[in-house]
Amino acid sequence: MHPALAVIFLTLFSGGGFGIMALTAIVNDFQIDRGLSPLQTMIAVILSLVFVSIGMLSSTAHLANPKNAWRAFTRWRTSWLAREGVFAVLYYPFAALYLIWVFFTGGTHDAVGLILVNLAGVIGLVTVFCQGMIYAVLRTIRQWNTALVPANFYAMGLATGATVLAAERIIMGAPADTLVGIALALLAASAVMKGIYYFWIGRPGGPTIRTAIGFNRSTVRILEQGHTFGTFLTEEFGHTLPTAKARSVKVVMYIFAFVIPIAALVISIATGQSAFAWIAVLSVIFGIGVERWLFFVEAQHVVNLYHGRQQC
Amino acid sequence: MRLGLVIDLDTCVGCHACAVACKEWNTSGTTAPLTDYDPYGAKPSGVWFNRIRHYEVGDYPYNKTINFPMSCMHCENAECVTVCPTGASYKRAEDGIVLVDQNKCMGCNYCSWACPYGARELDRVSGTMKKCTLCIDRIYDMEIPEEERQPACVLTCPAHARMFGDVDDPESPVSRAVRDRGGYQLMPELNYNPTNHYLPPRVHAPIPTEELKKKVVRKVKEWVNRVVER
């Protein structure tokens, strides 16, 4: 698949933004590390809104005809893309109301505040599920057509959110022991989840060039693609990554997405140096961005079989 | 009614006439134009509803060239329609034709991801997804003679390798051809249940290509050729 920056940014930033909101709700629900102060809560909610908005705005850059974008909310009965749009828009009023409530009353964890933050958190998590299902329902792409895709989106979104929230606490000089623990656990869990995913898609399977053109008992080779230069199909679906290169990109991804953030958070909480907290946040966003890039480049659409690939 | 095409891989000669006729008709049809990018330059590309690929099936000397035209299969389980968030993609209840409403499409490419057969192509100029309409502006046109109410690709095919008809009617010529010749669907494991079927090549007695018995005249000609060359 063509790794369009617009879609990478959409899933990366909105996943992280919804993760921040869900973690804010959990931390204020259970008063983890004595809960977030009103100022910390407002910063977290604003960060969440900024992240989600970056994602949503960049997703419109992926549209070739954005003047019809409003119609994307109409087919929520059948389309996961429409459902994602509906829930993402539904998220804004609850997040904004919580922000306003905390600003005027300081009530981060009174009844009204908790209802608002939990609703926003749940709607955010539902949106992440819809986002994962956009890819997971496609039977044409074996690497996406698995329940591990929404599971991974959850793990990464929550890990990003927890890292941002823990870093915020450290930078603002508030106690963050439990928060850092949560962030480390979520980062480690998403590293394992991603490992399971790579193991899963590494196994050969799916349609072959033989079933694609229907000569099931013979070898089939492409003689001629039938076009002089590329087509929409080769531009959109033709991207591949050699196995050796994919492996080294995955090593880079694991280092930036998981190893550096975990190490930086540990150093930061041990020494109280807020610079390391910044490093953790920047590193996790870059690392998960690389992971999302891999997610698209490694996806092999079955239409490639008609252009001569033996198996997808 | 379930309208679609049946393509005979035995007689298709791979001339691309169907693709050219399709482009010519549809570039001024309901989803017109089919934009070309850099048509006379070094990297010509553009929107086509019908593409022909060529494959080698089997290993030498038991190999064969298969010319393989592909357009929208008008699937019964058209996932491209299910995933469309705007409602621009739809499948007509009365005849099963899958269409894109150009006024509703927002160009998100999602339907092309859902299509296993590469039937949908984005027009970068209009920003909308375009695809085979089964020449819906021909097949229901009461102004033209009845025998011409067929898709442009079918009418133009010089090898009569393309048939158009109702796959739901068991007595229609297309259904009979599928039944008699063992017509099949592409990638049945994905369960899209495409309407278009492909007829496999007929089994012929092999034609010897080596050690042909040479006629006397031919032998003399070859001898003369060799002598003259010296």
Image (spheres, grey):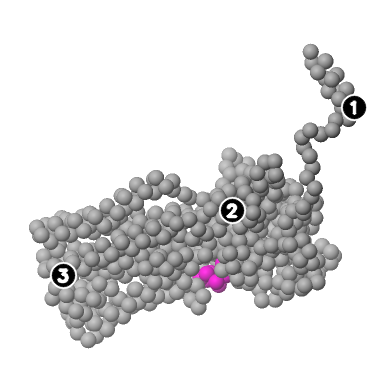
**Left or right of A177, for residue A136:** right
**Left or right of A248, for residue B66:** right
- The chain letter for the residue carrying disc 1 is B
Disc 2 to disc 1, C-alpha distance: 46 Å
- The residue to which callout 2 is attached is A209
Amino acid marked by disc 2: Ile
Residue A229, located in which quarter of the rendered image?
A: top right
State which region is magenta: B80-87
Callouts 2 and 1 close, C-beta under 8 Å: no
- What number is the disc on residue B216? 1
Report helix, strand or loop for mark 3: helix
- The chain letter for the residue carrying disc 3 is A
Callouts 3 and 1 close, C-beta under 8 Å: no
**Left or right of A16, for residue B75:** right
Disc 3 to disc 1, C-alpha distance: 98 Å
Q: Nearer the viewer, mark 2 or mark 1?
A: 1
Determine the residue positioned at 24% across, 82% down.
Answer: A114
Q: Residues within 10 Å of mark 2 (few under 14, many from 20)?
A: many
